[in-house]
Image: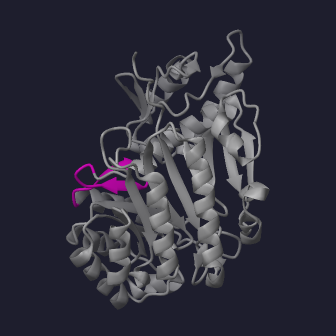
Amino acid sequence: MSAAPRRAAVAYYVHVPFCAAHCTWCDYPVTVGGLERAPELVTAVLAEVKTLRAALADRPVAALYVGGGTPSFLPQGELRRLLAGLAGALHPPAGDDGGGRPVESTLEVNPEDVTGELLATCAGAGIDRLSVGVQSFADSSLQRLGRRCTASELHAAMALLTRRWPGRLNIDLMAGVPGQRFADVQADVDRVADLGVGHVTLLQLADPPPGGLQPSAGADELWLAAGEQLRRRGYADYEVSHFARGGDRSRYLCHVLRMQPVAAAGPGAVGTLPAAAAASYGGPVRTESGAVRCTHAAELDRYLAGSAAGWGCTPEPVPTQGLLVEHLLQGLRLTEGIDAESAWLRPPLGTLLDELWDRWQRLGLAHRHGARLALTARGRLQLDGLVAAASDHLHSEAGGDQPVFAAWPDGAGS
């Protein structure tokens, strides 16, 4: 008797909302201070992850990403309890992510929280990748961004990381900070490259929350200059804002952008689940596409109400048209693009977008390689506008003689 086929892998996202301060550019759901409630949060998150894991027990765990907020801001005892609980729930004995590799586990860290104790806690709990919110190595930019650390403290933290951390590193850099010059962003890139960091997320200061920090007039040019400097230093951009050396890509990010399932826990967290697993929040959800978006309320009190209130989560069906547009918006961020012949779309995207894609190719915005559709570097800079045009095109196709059908394949691929 043959064994049942393995189900598609799922990634887990955990949101820790606590921060020491709300940075002037940040629009993520955060709770300033409030660490007296950290034990409640950790207990609730672990209970939710346990429920999700039971609903997804037939699926390998592709990756774990603990973000925020600032997970490293948690008291050490609570951070240890959180990470140990997540490892117990999600890391299989063989550490297999479904592809024969250990589960990638990432924790977001602020430089001012980096200590030998923190690094030992992370390594001991199976965290193998740290994402460090540096943004800039210049005091002037750090001050404008509302960061708590100084440049000298940041350099000390990076020295400790490169000396003591045995795993992988991502560094966040930001371009477009008021007062920032080309020389500043190039110096930031050189500093990261000289440290031997394998992965860089290059952010652009733009579209701040109301009252937030406004980007500099030359933000686009600064961001492009930083990207060029990263390429000169041996990094390849595999996504609009993400650069890697030696293939050191974020498996969690690629999983998300390929439209594979994400189970999310914590206030403000958002995931996408197959309908059967989404029912764990309180009942079945009817969905034509097979995908359910699970959005948690950002309010800490509502989340801490616990399982009796579904952890403040609202499951909603993802409509067919929305699924198609999201597939384009996410997948075309990757340099590898999307599968033109994907089995879960009928007619396939290559057919639906044929005329539009030919026009984009003539304009130097897109190309085809094999069975994949991808945007050029110039096209990815115009991603939102191109996807809006594709959405209009798909909408007209859906109303034509041959209806468009999309059935999310439970994350089997893109």
Can residue 177 be seen?
Answer: no
Q: Is residue 216 above or below residue 203?
A: below
Q: Nearer the viewer, residue 227 or 44?
A: 44
Q: Nearer the viewer, residue 210 or 28?
A: 28
Tell me where residue 162 appears, x and y as whole percent: 24, 75
Q: Quadrant of the N terminus?
A: top left
How many numbered badges does the structure rendering display?
0
Q: Is residue 46 above or below residue 342?
A: below
Tell me where residue 378 appears, x and y as whole percent: 43, 44
Q: Is residue 238 above or below residue 387?
A: below
Q: Is residue 106 magenta?
A: no
State the extent of the magenta-drawn residues as a range: 233-247
Residue shown at the point (72%, 14%) measured from the top left: 400
Quadrant of the rendered structure where residue 284 is?
top right
Residue shown at the point (38%, 38%) measured from the top left: 98
Tell me where residue 197 appears, x and y as whole percent: 26, 66
Q: Residue furthest front?
A: 1
In the visual, does 318 lie left or right of 358? right
Residue shown at the point (50%, 83%) measured from the top left: 147
Q: Nearer the viewer, residue 16 or 196?
A: 16
Quadrant of the rendered structure where residue 183 is?
bottom left
How is this picture coloured?
Answer: one colour
Q: Is residue 238 magenta?
A: yes
Can residue 278 be seen?
Answer: yes
